[in-house]
């Protein structure tokens, strides 16, 4: 199945991407000619990983009838110093409320299923860089 987005230049360093009928503005920092009117492309890659895996994990935990009341996914990436600057490694942190009484074995199973079977963003990125993960209870 072919998927396609449109990304239109709107002036200076800004672009507007249309993704599934939704508009996302991208821009650069003022130091490189942008107006800082939108996020940069590379951090959006991190957001894509967080959203993809997060949706998998919450879907699986709901099917397991786990009592999730709060869930947060953080993704950090180590950016290289030299051009072309890219993420040389990624780490996904899945955060849950300790007071929810989640079964840790189910949480870890959901994360492993996302990372190893369901999340296409993670599967693609793993072909280029190491992707680590951890589960944290707060």
Image (cartoon, rainbow, N blue to C red):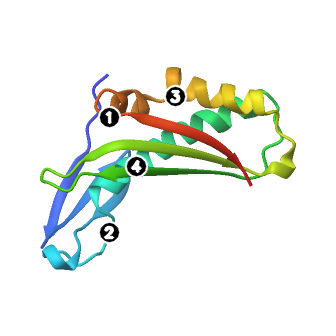
- Mark toward the start of the polypeptide (4 vs 3): 4
At mark 2, the secondary structure is loop
Q: Nearer the viewer, mark 1 or mark 3?
A: 1
Tell me the CA gap for discs 4 and 1.
Answer: 13 Å
Residue at 59% from the left image edge and 23% from the top image edge: 113
Counting residues from the N terminus, which is met first, the one under dot 1 or under dot 3? 3
> In the displayed structure, does residue 95 sit left or right of residue 83?
right
Q: CA distance from mark 1 to mark 2?
A: 26 Å
Q: Are marks 4 and 1 in contact (CB under 8 Å)?
A: no
Residue in front for this viewpoint, 7 or 97: 97
Residue under label 4, please give it: 46
Q: Could you say where residue 12 lies in the image, as x and y percent from the top left? A: 12, 73
What kind of element bears circle 4? helix
**Dot in front, 4 or 2:** 4
Cα distance, mark 2 to mark 3?
Answer: 29 Å
Numbered badge on residue 22 = none
Cα separation, mark 4 vs mark 2, equals 15 Å
Q: Nearer the viewer, mark 2 or mark 3?
A: 3
Residue 129 marker: 1
Q: Could you tell which of marks 4 and 1 lies nearer the N-terminus?
A: 4
- Above or below, 59 against 117 in this view is below
For the point 53% across and 38% down, the residue is 133
Can the viewer see residue 133 in this picture?
yes
Report the disc number at residue 38.
2
**Disc 3, SS:** helix
Query: Considering only vertical position in the picture, is 73 above or below 37?
Result: above
- What element does badge 1 sit on? loop
Q: Earlier in the sequence, mark 1 or mark 2?
A: 2
Q: Position of residue 59 (x, y in %)?
A: 66, 33
Q: CA distance from mark 1 to mark 3?
A: 14 Å
Q: Nearer the viewer, mark 1 or mark 2?
A: 1
């Amino acid at each position: 199945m072919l998927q396609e987005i449109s990304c239109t230049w709107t002036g200076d360093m800004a672009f507007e991407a249309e993704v599934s009928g939704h508009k996302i503005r991208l821009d650069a920092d003022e130091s490189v000619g942008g107006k800082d009117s939108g996020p940069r492309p590379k951090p959006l890659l991190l957001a894509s990983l967080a959203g993809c895996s997060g949706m998998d994990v919450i879907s699986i935990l709901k099917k397991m009838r786990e009592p999730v009341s709060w869930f947060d996914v953080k993704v950090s990436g180590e950016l290289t110093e030299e051009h072309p600057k890219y993420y040389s490694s990624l780490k996904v942190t899945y955060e849950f409320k300790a007071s929810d009484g989640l079964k840790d074995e189910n949480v870890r199973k959901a994360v492993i299923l996302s990372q190893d079977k369901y999340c296409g963003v993670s599967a693609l990125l793993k072909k280029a860089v190491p992707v680590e993960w951890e589960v944290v209870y707060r």
